[in-house]
Structure formats: structure tokens, C-alpha cells
Image (cartoon, coloured by chain):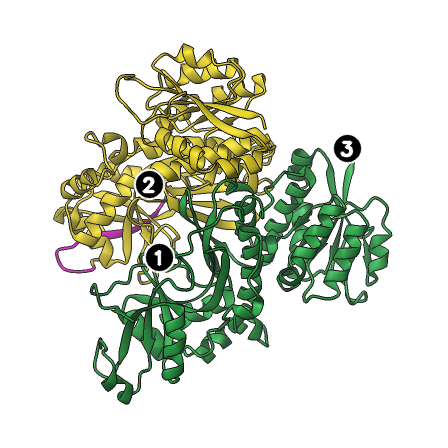
Chain colours: A yellow, B green
Amino acid sequence: MTTIKIALLGFGTVGQGVYHTIRTHQRELASILGKKVEVAAVLIKNKERDRGIEDGILVTDNFEDILAINGLDVIVEAIVGREPAFSYLQKAIYRGCHVITANKEMFAAHGTELKKLAGIHGVTIGFEATVAGGVPVIQTVLQLLNVNRIKKIEGILNGTSNYILSEMRTAGKSFEEALIAAQEKGYAEADPTNDVEGYDAFYKLMILSEIAFGGKPDWDDVPREGISSITGEQIKQAEKLGLRFKLIASIQRAGGKITGSVRPTLVSESHPLFNIEGVENSVSIEADIVGRITLQGPGAGMYPTASAVIEDLIHSLLNRKVKHPSIPHLVKAVPESAGKNEKQNWVMMGLGNSTLKSIPNWSIAENESLRFLEADETTVSRLKEQNNKASFFEVLGEPVLEPNVFEKV
Amino acid sequence: MTTIKIALLGFGTVGQGVYHTIRTHQRELASILGKKVEVAAVLIKNKERDRGIEDGILVTDNFEDILAINGLDVIVEAIVGREPAFSYLQKAIYRGCHVITANKEMFAAHGTELKKLAGIHGVTIGFEATVAGGVPVIQTVLQLLNVNRIKKIEGILNGTSNYILSEMRTAGKSFEEALIAAQEKGYAEADPTNDVEGYDAFYKLMILSEIAFGGKPDWDDVPREGISSITGEQIKQAEKLGLRFKLIASIQRAGGKITGSVRPTLVSESHPLFNIEGVENSVSIEADIVGRITLQGPGAGMYPTASAVIEDLIHSLLNRKVKHPSIPHLVKAVPESAGKNEKQNWVMMGLGNSTLKSIPNWSIAENESLRFLEADETTVSRLKEQNNKASFFEVLGEPVLEPNVFEKV
């Protein structure tokens, strides 16, 4: 039986998960591929630390050692940041290796280029692990929605933020207290900016945009807002309305234009993302034939992410054909009516008394002034400028409120 | 450009959906397949009724006319019942056509045989539409969970029952009233037995069992219970406990044995099936590497089901390799510990006063006598015999109850 040789770049949580899974699932891999799968080398930063890597496997801090391995088939990259990951993968592709990455920031920035390069060199690039951990959303879009035209994707793509929002709601914690809890559980980094300010969800959204629509919006045109300014008081107000705060990453194509956002959003019970709690991730896909389908599962963690990498390995090695996302998904024009000018429901929180007097509003209790709006993004932007102390949150799903409470603006 | 010729057997909701979708998505199909897709013929029962089928398409009530079509590539079967569907598909396969079916009862009974026959004759058989409508659960198991070993699948597979349970809970209706509402909306047949007594969910579960585990349990060994005996009172009691009734179809493999059931079950908020309401379907898959992933979407309807058929068409024609489910998924033994002898949480409802005196119980309110048990299936069967007026419901997810309320039996 011939052998598939793999090198791992990075031996953190994901790298270790892949290493162990390859060892525990030798039988399955051999049965599916008809070949033995072997980890030939591991690239690490500090060679001195003992990591329990089996003798006979090359452990090196020099990427050139990896490239020099005779008959290397696949390079799995699980390091953090754009560089040196991008340069490594470029070299790997030139060298004729299939590549699999779990690096969302690098892939959001350089995925288009890497995919093109891989095409030229006749190798594949797997990136399931870059979005929503073990949830197979990338392959669902690439392999299972071929004829369906995707219209919109809404997702909870950052487990850390979702855990914090869950803790704030269920345990009545402040943002700061919930963040500490997340850090203690290992769900948040010492510097949590990337997660709680929406950067991580943004990178994932850009990767989804490209596979669903064959392109990405200008990054600067995508509003990106995190959850650090959400207060316990706002969460309580939402709860009284039957709504829950979620950090929603959303991308849609309408009128030939791709628009997206990452921001705290109010979700009602009728929406499939309402009940996603803790570190779970979920992605809801609206497509023209099937309607809406939603996937949910572990968004991070050693084995869920390893699962994504290992399943990508099978797709790469069996060389399954997948649709080219730009054909036909950008061929057919979508009606101009949709998009930025479409009206959504909004809740406006934190109105001052003076504002209260001048605009109509609907209060759910004394001392809690809220305003319910049905407005498009442009109008909301204008209102935000006029009411710079108020917060505006879009509402997803049928709100559990009296009908017509949303005032058309 | 060459042409793919398709015949549709049946022109009900699904057949019509496929017919229209092929027409509206010509461009997408041509772009993916490099070939034009054409409906060459439609088999119907009553030739006299006008169905708005375009001139030039053969409309016939004789299956032999279909088989006689020159260069026929694919037969899509969307009729009801085991026969004549099974015989038609056998003949289609002998004739060298790819087949795609939406017929769950036929496929649950004859799927193994048809798959074998298709293998011998070098054609493919698509059956995504037989389970959970537009939710791509079949292809997720076959194509996206190759290395993962599936341990358990839990699903809400019957939209009619789920709609009725939702109506009973949210609108306070009785089973009978909710059934009438479902019939008025077209969600339930005049004779609803197949849906409300769990047969439909059972057929789908058997199809899932075979793709996940490479085999099915003996049909007689699978407890199948519907929702017709659930009362409004029981739903209210559950609601007070933070639990919701769902008709859960469940299948698992443990100790080399496959066990399953279809029955009303209590689901808590921590479980992904808790918030599935109305006619939605959902399938939760537990696998050894990834953990639990859950899919949700429309379980029936013209276009969701057509979506499943059309996407199968692509898989058939691109001849994508999929794992053979019996290899490696039955190769590796699963620990003997799990399965029928594993203890679950149960709520016992409808205890008489005499029973109440003799066994420990925990009442949530006066006149509402409940008992909370932690017991295996065998013990519950014994208790059922001893308390034949009581109802026993398994609890999925972490129950929102005081810890240790479940009494070990």
C-alpha cells in the first residue's frame, strides 16, 4: 500500500488535533483512500520543547526542510497571521503539494490568489477549517448547493462573542465579567480584540462571500462592529421583547452588488440563529430553490477543527470536482429591488428625554425608552448621526411584538 | 452542446417542482454539466387532465413508453407507495438509466437492493429527497463525513407532526384542533396516519441508518409511536419544566448493534432540536471527530424537495465518488458500554394517586404528579408494564431542572 505524506505547519491546538486524528483513524483513511496516511514532518517555532511527537517524524523550525521532503503530498497549515503562512503556502503550491489551511485571516486576505495559483499548478486547496470550525459549511456551499443560487448568508461565526453574550443574558454578567469567564475557560485570548470586535467573524464572512458569490465586497464598505459596547441593561431590554443579542455576520448579493456587515443584532425566536448559545457556531443560507437551510455545530476546538482538515484531505486526494463559484453564480442578475435599500426592522435603544419628546416611540415599561423602526440602511445611518447617543440594532426573524409597532421611516 | 434527457415519473408536487426548476435553471445546469438538460417525458396516471406540460414533451400513462425513449439518461421517480415505483426503478436501472427517487417508503423497503443493482449496472441512485426534503442530510453523511464515524443521529423528520406539536404548545390547541389546522394548511393528508403515527419518520430513519451505519435494525425491533395520544395537559406540564415535546426519530450504533426509535420525546433548551418549530425538519448528527453538527431546513414542499432532486442530478451526472458506507463505518467496533443499557433521563406523566403513594416523586405543582427517572430502556419497559396508565418520555439535552431530581432506577 502506497503512502500519502503530510507535513504539518504549526503544532498548536489544530495541528495537534490533526496529528492525533490521523493516528487514531488510520484504518478509515486507508479504507477510503486505498493508501496509508503518514505525518512525515512538523514545523514548529521552538524545536527544544518536547511535544510528544513520535520518533522518526521530522521536527524542524526551518520550512525549507519541509519542502525538501521527498514525495511530500500535502501541507496542512495551522499557524496564525498572514505571514509567513501565505509565503509558505505559495511555495508549497509551486512545489506541487496539495494545501489545507485553518488560517482564516491569511485566507480571507490571500485566498483568491492561492486558489488561482493552486489551479495553475494542478493542486487543490482545502479551507473548510477557516470558517465555523467543524461545521461543514464550505463544502456544503461548494458541493451540495450547485444549482441553487445563494442569496444571503447569516451566521454566528465567532464562538467567543457568542459565549460572552450567552453569559451576559443567562447569568446577568456584565461584558467585562463575561469576558473574564471566557478567558478562564480558554474561549478568549488574553487580548480578545480579534474576537470581540468582530475581526474574526469578518474574515470568515469574506471567505464565505467568495465561495457563495464568487467575489467579496470592498473590505472598507463592510460595517464591522463588535460586542464590547453591549450593556447588561440592553440585553435585559431585548429579553423583555423576546429578542436576543447575537453577533451576526451577514452577506448578501442583490442587484449584482455584494453587501455585508458584522454587528450586534437582535434575533427573535422564529429565526434559526435565536437558540445558538455558548461557543457554538451556526450558518444560515438562503438559496433560491431550497429556501433557507441552517447548519450548527462546534465553531472551534481541537477535534472539530481537525475534523474539517481531515475531511478536506479526503476531498483533495479524491480530487472531487466542485463547481467554480463564479460560474454560474454570478451569471444571472438578481432583481435590483433588494439590498441596501430594502427596509429592515430596527430597535433603537438609549434615547434621551429630549429626543423622546420629538419623535414617536413605543415604551415597553417606564424608564425604558425604545423606538421601533422600519427603515433602510441609509435612513438608519442618517438617524444615527442625529441621535449619536442612541444605539440601533437590526431585528432578524418575526419579532414577537404587536403588529405594526415598527414605525415606517 | 449535447443534451441530458430526463423522464419524470409522477407529476404531483415534487414532479412539478422538478419540472419547473429544470426550466428556470437551464443556465446553471448547462454551466455545471456542460450539457443541456431536457425533460423528455412525464409519466402520469390520467392522461386526460391538462397539466400545462409543454408541447413536444411525451406525456404517457404507460411506463414502457418511457423505457423506449432513445438515449434516456435519468429517471426521476416521485410517486407514492412501494409499487409500482420499485418495479419501475428496477427496470430503469436494467435499462442503464441513472435514477433519482423522492419515495421514502419504497426506498426504506428496497433501497439496499436498488443500490446494489445500480452498482452492478454502473448507474447511480440519488435519494436526497427521501429524507428531510431540502435539507442536504444524505449528501452531508455520504460526502462530508467520510473519516468521521457516526455514533448517533436524532431528527425531527416529520413536518406535519412537528407543526401539530407547535400549534398545541403555542396556540393551546388540542391534538384534534391542531390536526385540522394542519389539514387546512395542506400540511396533513385527509388520512394523517402515516405522518402522525410516526411511519413517515420511521421510513426516513431507516434510510439514514443505512447510510450512516451500513445497515438497518430489524424493523420490528424499532419502537414506533406517534403523537396522537399527546394531550394539551402534557404539553403544558412539559412547558413548566422548560421542556418541549418533539417527535424524535433516533438511531445509534453501539456495541456493534444498531438501535433506534421514533417517539414523542421531551427536549430541553440546550438541545439543538428544541427550537425547531412548525413544518421545519432538523437532523442532529453525532460523530467521533467533529462532535455534534445539526442541519435544519424545509422538510417538504415543492421547491425544497425539487432542490434535493436537482442537486442529486448533478452528483449523478458528475459521478462523484462517495464512500461506501459499510467501509469503514462498520469496520471499527464501538465500545460495548453504550446503547440500550445506557441510562437516559425520563419524565413519567399521568401517575395515579395510588402509585404516587408508593413511589418517590417530585411534584412541580399540586394536582400535577410527575416522576423523574434515570433509567435504561429495559427498566423503563418494565415500569411501563407496572404503570400502564402512565406515560414515559425520554428527555434530550440538559434538563432545566434542579440537579439530582432524576431518581436513579
Question: Bounds of the magenta span?
Answer: A364-377
Give the residue pinned by disc 3: B1
In the image, is residue B368 above or below residue A219? below
Q: Nearer the viewer, residue A59 or A374?
A: A59
**Foreground: disc 1 or disc 2:** 1
Q: Secondary structure at mark 3?
A: loop
Q: Disc 2 versus disc 3: distance between alpha carbons?
A: 49 Å
**Image location (x, y in percent) of residue A409:** 33, 48
Residue at 54% in and 49% down: B330
Badge 1: residue crowd in 10 Å (few <14, some 14–19, many ≥20): some
Give the chain of mark 3.
Answer: B
Q: Amino acid at mark 3?
A: Met
**Image location (x, y in percent) of residue A328:** 60, 34
**Same chain? Circles 1 and 3:** yes
Sequence-first disc among 1 and 3: 3
Residue at 69% in and 62% down: B79
Q: Which mark is residue A379?
A: 2
**Image location (x, y in percent) of residue B244:** 35, 67
Badge 2: residue crowd in 10 Å (few <14, some 14–19, many ≥20): few
**Image location (x, y in percent) of residue A51:** 30, 25
Q: Which mark is residue A401?
A: none
